[in-house]
Image: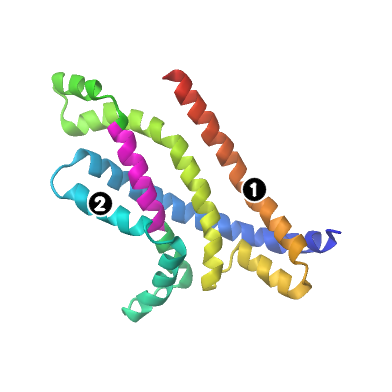
Amino acid sequence: MFDILIANLPYLMKGTVQTLWLAVVGVGLGTLLGMGLGVTSAMIGGGVPALIGTYVFIIRGIPVLVWMFLAYYMLPQLGLVVGDVTAVIGALVLYTGAFVTEIARGAVMAVPRHQTEAAKALGMRKFTMLRLVILPQAVTLSIPPLLNNSVMMIKATSYVSVVGVWELTYAAREVVERTLAAFQIFLGVMLIYFLICYPLTLAARYLEKRYSYEH
């Protein structure tokens, strides 16, 4: 029954490698962006948090697929010549960054206030306090939601096929067009995504339980 899926599995695995590459680059850079913005928003006053909040509000309020379309079609209109992969990765970075910003900001704000006050009483400068007291605890707090967010963004990479970027979902569509075996092929694709995402989900649950137990 699954002979067509088995015969086309090597081609689908090539698409899987491309999907993983898109996820690593897009989610990785987006996480770095979001961590930086989240910590900045929590630690710096003035109008900076409002600007960061506006970025988060706008980006999160529009589906990632729309941002991919805008990046793919709008950038050339502005005279910026970029490849299709670069365009969709840029959209994924901005979208991931918006979610991670809130995760990081919430983690920093969740650090007990008496610990920062104690650090100030010891004469720690702001940067030293951030490096030695706040960030280690904030990173621990943020790891489970970051893993959950990564799962969501890995699945979001399937949207890039809509704008013509080749990856697992696009490869599956090509195979289906040749074989007309949609059920077999997309069942295989479903299992591949599951095998990618499920370990991250388990890791997030484990870390959530471990953190809850320790605190």
Colour setting? rainbow
User: Which disc is residue 40 wearing?
Assistant: none
Q: Quadrant of the C terminus?
A: top left
Tag on residue 194?
1
Find residue 82 and report its image quarter.
Answer: bottom left
Q: Amino acid at mark 2?
A: Ile
Count of numbered marks: 2
How far from the left and from the top, in percent, is residue 65? 47, 65
In the image, what residue occupies the spot 51% across and 26% down?
Answer: 209
Which amino acid type corresponds to the residue marked 1 in the rendered image? Phe
Residue 60 shown in magenta: no
- In space, the residues marked 2 and 1 are separated at their CA atoms by 34 Å
Q: Position of residue 142 (x, y in %)?
A: 40, 36
Residue hosting label 2: 52
Which stretch did the figure color magenta? Answer: 93-109
Residue in the image at 80% along x and 59% along y: 6
